[in-house]
Image (cartoon, helix red, strand yellow):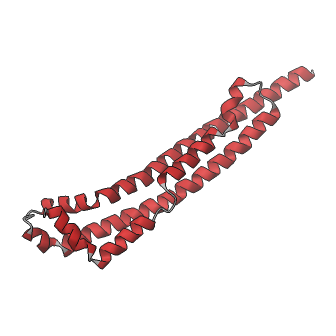
Amino acid sequence: MDQLARMRMLLKKDIRWKRFRSIMKNAWQPTLETNIDEIKTLHAGRSARTLAGKLPTGKRVADASARDIMVRSRCVEIAMDAVVIAELMNSALGAVSKYVETRYSNEMKRMGLTGVNERKAMVTTLLNSYYDKHDEVKTIIKIADMVIADCDKTSFGLRHMVESLAVATRREGL
């Protein structure tokens, strides 16, 4: 049996390891794909995206602005949840990493991992899939932030469009 398999067998019996796995498993109930799909759907449904091809009217601009406010708000909500989860995961990863390094130091030495860096590498390897989950949560934050930034930029453009419509309406009314 290789070193990694032996460490996994030891950890399967460990109560703290089980608690860590439970935290990581339950930390992010909605799946990554669900959140990314929701953000993409919200972004695709923004009416501001279709304003360029149509003659802008006050109602269209107001609708686009209202929709962007809703999209931005939901993306902020998703990003906030993801930040909380990412911090929880980060704390759990740091704590379990230190725990495994100290608690199982002698066992790893008996397996031939005599150097500190070798033992840290073993722990990192054991935690790789959890680090990947943590990175996925950070990806949700990045995607949500991109849509939020786009909504902010669009809001700036919509404001100028309203001002242009107001000027055009005044000129036509003269």
Task: Locate the N terminus by quadrant.
Answer: bottom left
Which of the 4 image quarters holds residue 17? bottom left
Image side of residue 97 versus residue 39, left or right:
left
Q: Is residue 122 above or below residue 63?
A: below
Residue at the (47%, 46%) spot, across then down: 142
Q: Is residue 18 above or below residue 126?
A: below
Image side of residue 51 versus residue 21, left or right:
right
Residue at the (77%, 39%) spot, across then down: 62
Coordinates of residue 67 in the picture (x, y in percent): 71, 44
Task: Locate the C terminus by quadrant.
Answer: top right
Residue at the (68%, 46%) spot, across then down: 69
Furthest residue toward bottom: 15
Image side of residue 113 versus residue 61, left or right:
left
Furthest residue toward right: 174
Coordinates of residue 77 in the picture (x, y in percent): 59, 56
Q: Count the marks: how many?
A: 0
Q: Is residue 143 above or below residue 130?
A: above
Image side of residue 137 versus residue 9, left or right:
right
Q: Is residue 71 above or below residue 107?
A: above
Residue at the (48%, 50%) spot, across then down: 140
Coordinates of residue 73 in the picture (x, y in percent): 64, 51
Coordinates of residue 50 in the picture (x, y in percent): 69, 30
